[in-house]
Amino acid sequence: MTSQSQGIHQLLQAEKRAKDKLEEAKKRKVKRIKQAKDEAMVEIDQYRMQRDKEFRMKQSKIMGSQSNLSEDIEEQTLEKIKELHGSYNKYMESVLTQVLNMVCDVKPEIHMNYRATN
């Protein structure tokens, strides 16, 4: 009888050890799955960043940089304004003189369509 109880006791211990090993294996499996998931997320993020960088490079190559375009337009506008101010300053005196001469030099003449009715 004692040998039977010892055998049963050994079987129970073996079953417990097997159950512990299964639990340990399950824990390792869950841990490894989590680790694989984290590694996959890192790879996905790296790939996404790489593709985004390539897209931005292609976009800037094709369309040019928006800041460069706005800077060019701003520069052209300032040059045009300077040019117009220079032209204004250059011709202002002569135009004013011409206008004043036209207004102040009155030469009374009879209009050619006027008919004297005497």
Image (tube, rainbow, N blue to C red):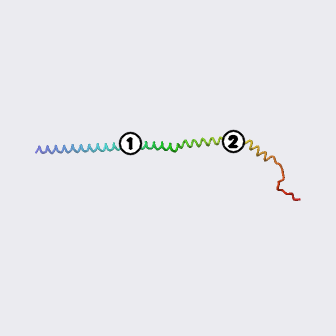
Q: Where in the figure is residue 27, as x and y percent of width and height?
A: 28, 43
Q: Position of residue 76 (x, y in %)?
A: 61, 42
Task: Find the residue positioned furthest to the right.
Answer: 118
State the image quarter where residue 88 is shown.
Answer: top right
Count residues near mark 2 (Cα–Cα under 10 Å), then give few for <14, some for 14-19, many for 20+.
few
**Image quarter of residue 81:** top right
Q: Residue at x 17, y 44 (%)?
A: 11
What quarter of the picture does the C terminus occupy? bottom right
Q: Which residue is mark 2?
A: 87
Left or right: 86 as drawn, with respect to 45: right
Tell me the element at label 2: helix
Towards the viewer: 23 or 118: 118
Name the amino acid, label 1. Answer: Glu
Q: Which mark is residue 94?
A: none
Answer with the quarter of the image where residue 8 lies: top left
Q: Which residue position is annotated with label 1?
A: 43
List x then y, in percent, for residue 74.
59, 42
Q: Amino acid at mark 2?
A: Ser
Camera-near label (2 vs 1) is 2
Which percent across, then down, holds residue 82?
65, 40
The answer to whether residue 20 is left or right of residue 44 is: left
Disc nearer the start of the sequence (2/1):
1
